[in-house]
Amino acid sequence: MSTRLAKHGRLIDRSKQIAFTFNGKSMQGFAGDTLASALLANGQVMMGRSFKYHRPRGVVASGSEEPNALMQLGVGDRYEPNQRATTTELFSGLTAQSQNHWPSLEFDVLAVNNKLSRFLTAGFYYKMFIHPRPLWKHVYEPIIRKSAGLGAAPDKELKDADTYEHFYFFADVLVIGGGVAGLQAAKAAAASGAKVLVLEQNSHWGGRAPVDGGTIDGEAPEAWIEKTLAELRGMDNVTLRDRCMGSGVYDHGYALGYERLTDHAPGQGGPRHRLWRIRASQIVTATGAIERPLSFAGNDVPGVMLAASMRDYVVNWGINPGQKVVVATNNDDAYRTALVLHDAGVEVVRVVDTRETGGGALMEAVREKGIRVELGRAIAKVKDGKCVTEVAICAQNGEGGARETVQADAVAMSGGWSPVVHLWSHCGGKLIWDEANANFRPDASRPPLGDNGEGFVVPAGAANGEFGLGALLEDAAAAGAKAAEAAGFPAKSVAAAKGESEEEARMEAVWLMPAKADIKLRMKSWLDYQNDVKVSDVQLAAREGYESVEHTKRYTTLGMATDQGKLSNINGLAILADSLNSEIPQVGTTTFRPPYHPISLGAIAGEARAEIFQPVRKTPIYDWFDKNGADWEPVGQWRRPFSINKPGEDRHAAVNREVKNTRENLGLLDASTLGKLVVKGPDAGKFLDMLYTNMMSTLKVGKCRYGLMCTENGFLMDDGVVARIDEDTFLCHTTTGGAERIHGWMEEWLQTEWWDMKVYVANVTEQYAQIAVVGPNARKVLEKLNAAAGGGMDVSKEALPFMEWRDGKIGEFDARAYRISFSGELSYEIAVAASEGQAFWDALMEAGKEFGVMPYGTETLHILRAEKGFIMIGDETDGTVIPQDLGLHWALSKKKEDYLGKRAQQRSHMVDPERWQLVGLETVDGSVLPDGAYAVGEGVNANGQRNMIGRVTSTYHSATLGRGIAMGLVKHGPKRMGEVIEFPGTDGKTYKAKIVDPVFYDKDGEKQNV
Amino acid sequence: MSKAVSVLNGARFSGLATVEDAGLQGMITLRGDLGSKALKAAVKAATGAEVPAQGSISVAENGAAAWMSPDELLLLVPYEDAVAKTAEVSEALKGEHALAVNVSDARAFFRLSGEGAREVLGKVSPVDFDAAAFKPGQFRRSRLAQVAGAFWLNEDGSFYIICFRSVGEYVFKLLSTAAHPQSKVGVY
Amino acid sequence: MLILECPYCGVKAEETELAAGGEAHLKRYGPGSSDDEFHDYLFMRENPKGVHFERWRHANGCGKWFHAARCTMTLEVFGTYTAQTSEPPQEIKDKIAAKRPGWTWREFADGKK
Amino acid sequence: MKRYSVFAVAREALRYHTGWERAWRSPEPKRHYDVVIVGAGGHGLATAYYLGKNFGITNVAIIEKGWLGGGNTGRNTTIIRSNYLQDPSAAIYEKARSLYETMSQDLNYNVMFSPRGVIMLAQTEHEIRGYKRTAHANQQQGVQTEWITPERVKEIVPIINLHGPRYPVLGGLWQERGGTARHDAVAWGYARACSDMGMDIIQKCEVTGVRTENGRTVGVDTTKGPIDCDKIGMIVAGNASVLSEMAGFRLPMESVALQAMVSEPIKPCMDVVVMANTVHGYMSQSDKGEMVIGGGTDGFNNYTQRGSFHHIEETVRALVETFPMVSRLKMLRQWGGIVDVTGDRSPIISKTPVQNCFINCGWGTGGFKSIPGSGWAMAELMATGHSPLTEEFSINRFKEGKFIDESVAAGVAH
Ligand SMILES: Cc1cc2nc3c(=O)[nH]c(=O)nc-3n(C[C@H](O)[C@H](O)[C@H](O)COP(=O)(O)OP(=O)(O)OC[C@H]3O[C@@H](n4cnc5c(N)ncnc54)[C@H](O)[C@@H]3O)c2cc1C
Ligand SMILES: NC(=O)c1ccc[n+]([C@@H]2O[C@H](COP(=O)([O-])OP(=O)(O)OC[C@H]3O[C@@H](n4cnc5c(N)ncnc54)[C@H](O)[C@@H]3O)[C@@H](O)[C@H]2O)c1
Ligand SMILES: Cc1cc2nc3c(=O)[nH]c(=O)nc-3n(C[C@H](O)[C@H](O)[C@H](O)COP(=O)(O)O)c2cc1C
Ligand SMILES: [Zn+2]
């Protein structure tokens, strides 16, 4: 039962009370508390349930390594599962709920799993639930899924109430970690003039030192930290960020910083998280070290804590961790905890030290306080329960017999320290085994390599395996200087601050407690708390042949929980090495992957949500359509009206109306999205002859020609009308999707293959608003505009014949008019400056009234072209179709010996007469063929699939003809005119369709030539 | 004639920095041999500015020339003069292998000004905006979040930003979001 | 997240400003070439563990295509150079030779001039 | 071999699980094998398994440079479906899917095949047409798929946002018997069965050379010494080019990084697999509770098993937009794998210019789902020299221009 002490609490402000609730209960904490410290202060030792066995769990650590104390935070659109109580700063109104239990934390039905733990060992599910087959999906899996998972999922309709953003930053030296090593390294690097960025994940600087004591330059570490911070803040080549975690180190010096701006003060406005995208020449990882638990039975009972963490709770937050504490250790550092506890008035019942020879100065200091220290001893077992009550002590060197039982309500354990090597390792930094401290530390000779092939990460301080204050400050100063040097800033040698801490006796590697613990104890000795992986599980994995550390990890899930094994990895692989009679270095570690500590998906997505999730490209007439009933359809990044619906009209009715009206009166289409590429130069014609399958160099100035483009692989990729502007200038129209693609395609060939050609290309797509004026009345409306303006371009049949273009004035507007038609009607495509696009559109709509003008959308465009048998890129083509399939031989120049795709089209499969060919399709009953339907032939193929002989490429209801029309690719199609073939629908019906000529309407093209 | 409207039609947002429609701006894409005398002369004549050095913009009274690539410049001229000046430049470069096209209407044009300008741009563009790294007169083509864009820094600390017309609205919203009054980073 | 220096505008561009373009120095085969030649040109790709020459476009930038010499195992960049060449510059080849003695790639190799 | 069952587990529990046997032996290599399979990924192991099961060929070594299942089989997002468009693809993927249905029983190892259903969202008119086309094709190919309305999509995936401002959901292609499986277990289950048939799985042993005599393979060189064999199957995914180089032929292949990530585990909230190809992200929830998320490949040749972060960003953006509730979940871990991408993004299962040397590669971003079918067909090809399922996947197709292009209908092929 822990409570607040009268003394200590360097991080809390006792004058500021903060109210919060836990599982509905209101509680009080202080400013500066973490949720974990506040809960402890309120006597809440049990904070959650474990993943598999639903065992009661309390907080074991004080930082981001915490595996147990995970909470559901917040409500409504700010709800968030799996938040660590230890990294959650307390704020008033905070609401927390413990997770993974039902109905309550105190009483959890699934705690039966604990009783069954003997059956539910590692990998049990691979061996069970095999029979009977259907039960897995319908019974077993649902049950397993329900009991697994941690926090409750957010509401299905949750819309995050917060926003997020990204920020790019460039630094010569990035220092990750704001402990004394980080600060010392930063100071050394900054002195060279390098631009330095320092990231500290916590809201307070200095790391462990203020708690661990010792002196720096003769004063308390805290004083030095304040001074150094002040110095660094004073330098304009240094940037310090707290609450900002170095989340990952990526190739070429890229690093992510995860800044938590409002987690400690929700709803204050502004982004919640900011993801820093940092590019650094050099990165110093001064990320400290993490204490390891000891593996003894019941080491997961609430009240059992890491020794240094318990010390943190006392010193930083003034927490009284218990009345009677047992300290268990294999090293000297834990004695600091004993001292701190004693000094705080907590009874230390025992210090149990596995070392026969015990420790050094710190141990003596403890003994002087009259605290009982027992050497060569171990914890045999902590009695199961919702909190510590009894601790059995035995000889370390035995099976756990001959126990002495002591009453205690808390246990502080220390199994030694492991440097935080994650960020060093993310990009391939290698590790070496440090025998003396029994841990993996960075191997300076094998760092991760940057773009120049040189190392770009330098470890510093405890993160580099240097634990003594003196040594680690030296190490850090050197690291900072080295990084600056490598970044091109020769160090002005900064002497390291002089650190002094008690001499420490050598620790002893202890992986199991007691050393020969029997199976019953091993089945209760936890390695990975959150995923409920015990010593016996790793041993089982080894026995069953999952010998690779990667197999063991995946078979037992060791280290796969949300703490990513920060506490368990080393202990686990030591057990594995032992079971394999191998050495720890031989077994090796699993791969370290970002993020160091989980980061919100919101932060990763950044600002890109809702309206600016992705750019929407809009034509100059967009707003008009939006106001006038546009039924929008995304076309690439553009948005185009599928149809323009009158009030109360559905899209189908609208389309039929638009089609009819365009054929009978006058239709307007916003064709601005069509690509427009200017191609200019003495070699322009020659160049286009290579790009298009047909001849462009022979095109006369003033005329237009329809052209096809193929990939080098022979497949049709784009089409459009090319206009010759002058002797060496062409304007090439592309499909809407094609503009950027084809522009890039042209540049690619000009730059990388035919760089001797004198050709320039410019993409002028968006310079123009291009409007198709279509229908029998097209000429009338243009002439009316001209008349009104008194003169203008002559748009008569004679002056502007089909497939020609002219520059001039249309009404008030400077325009270029192309007499081209994708509908078979009399049609002009008129380009005006985009800025005048809306005005021009308005003029046409106004003048067109008397001629029955109506805008039409993409669907009508498709139907009009289909009625005329014109192919559509993306419908008739899909990346596997060549022009020959579409009967476009007329567009394949015989004269040219080469064009892109020509060689490909000579390959055996491309000239195969069995290829499906384009035809028109007419349903026998006039109905509309289903989209994408396939025509079936006789029998099945070698794999028992029904033989298919064709497919529908586009199909519509033609309002003009009052029936369904379609185009399709059919085996030997053109030779089978009149034949009826069958298309089985997915609706159970079979559609019969007659093979016909693809031109359904105005076969001789009368209408467009008037 | 006032038929012409800029894509943002005068839109403006004020937060960490001020984002505003910089209105209609004459722009001419000029491709050619940047070393040629004729071209230098044509640029001078059209804009009053010299051919800029790599990665920079040279500004004159009422015109400017920006370096787009080794064989491309963007000439800035008054909107009304764009058509005429495009013709002049083409005329002046007759005989040379060059291409001049009016792209004034294919662009959206912004001004980003105020204290936070560097920071705001730093949220959407993978470019170092540290005062030591990005100086007045520098011209950079890069990314504005998900679209291509170009920008340069003026003596007064404001930026001009250019993107394609069709995404003008996206970029305006993007910059406005980045300029949220409570999103100060505080590094520049 | 690679950074490559664009040889045209001198910008140290990050990957998001670039577009990767696959194997460099391909020789185009058109009509008249054998099925094998054409097939190899279109599909046979160098895919080495180690030194590789490849194409990139400074897409969100000057728009130019350029070449990069890069190690596919360490991602070390030996150098970038313009696309208007059918062979890597000697000094880049030498630089690679210094760091990867005995390297070979298609017809190019250590020591070969 | 001791069979796995609830009774076996109960029995073992009483003696604290001390009696379990090794799932597979770790033998030293013999001097000669009838067949050497290079690569102990899912495809290599499945090939070996069916060589034994269907053709009685058990003098087989499976040689693995790392740990078995540690390649892409051990790092994929486990989507299993067979709703492919082209006949050859549909045939082999459906064969595989149907074998998955009974895999746990065949192998006596619970691979947790979970036919929970897969939806591919249509978010453009073009996608609608593509998926309707696929549904029609699948009907003729004996693959059960169905075009469903947005309302139905919402029923099946309550957490989805149908009305995203950018790309509203217009419907989907639904394969009810698609799903996921426990990827590691697939490799382990096959390994256990192979080992039980007397095959040798040799881990931490890299093949460094392929020995040939007058156009025939005779063996391989490895870091554990030379091994003779009559036939070789190269089944090494991202390393295919490296192996083919050793054997003296080249492949129409490039190796690039594909990344994936998982969120922290939460209670069940999504019972199907959803793929959103327009915005390019896909997501499912594992039995342990993490949201398993993947997206697109990097653009450049890479052997590092690390990808570029901006692809993770694009994927996450897409999913936050499609499933707004994930915004406040956290990314727990990200990783990459090296996928083998061919000229038409479809696999190669084929004889090679070298006699008795067979190759199976090019599964790229989508070969977990095909493991049993591919193994089945590859075994048939290696044992008999012919397999209808592999016919169209031969290397020669590139010369003839006879491609198998799946990008036609769906953007991606995970
Ligand atoms: C991130 C990601 C997500 C994916 N998602 C999906 C998905 O959702 N659905 C799906 O169906 N597919 C998916 N895939 C694809 C799928 O994972 C692969 O296609 C499939 O696993 C390939 O299996 P394999 O056995 O051919 O290759 P691998 O599993 O990679 O096995 C090849 C083995 O060969 C070994 N090897 C290589 N060289 C040598 C040598 N010289 N000597 C000895 N051994 C060697 C390797 O170590 C490796 O173990 C995904 C892939 C990735 C990377
Ligand atoms: N005596 C022992 O056995 C022993 C062992 C280990 C450490 N120590 C003590 O610990 C201290 C070591 O100093 P140090 O500075 O090297 O380590 P430190 O632990 O004091 O400081 C590391 C700092 O880095 C921060 N950090 C870690 N990962 C981060 C990330 N990804 N992003 C941002 N910030 C991150 C931490 O919050 C912490 O503030 C000394 O006081 C030393 O005496 C003692
Ligand atoms: C379907 C799937 C689910 C995974 N779930 C987890 C998980 O819950 N926790 C975890 O740490 N890693 C998880 N991983 C990732 C693995 O830890 C590992 O990163 C991945 O297999 C790649 O291996 P590597 O990182 O060792 O290279 C998962 C991987 C896959 C394919
Ligand atoms: Zn460039």
Image (spheres, grey):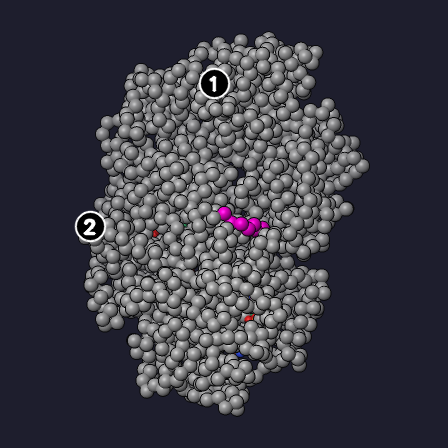
A723 and D213: which one is in front? A723
Front one among B73 and A258: A258
Occupied quadrant, residue A983: top left
Q: Are marks 1 and 2 on the same chain?
A: no
Q: Which residues are magenta?
A: A159-167
Residue occupying the far right of the picture? B61
Q: Is residue B40 above or below residue A511?
A: above
Q: Is residue B39 visible?
A: no
At horizontal 30% and vertical 65% (from top left) the residue drawn is A112
Residue identified by numbered label 2 = D55
Q: In which chain is the residue bearing label 2?
A: D
Residue at the image position 31 percent from the left and 17 percent from the top: A924
Q: Quadrant of ligand 3?
A: bottom left
Mark 1: which secondary structure?
Answer: helix
* Residue at the (49%, 86%) spot, across then down: A359
Residue D171: give its label.
none
The numbered mark at residue A657 is 1
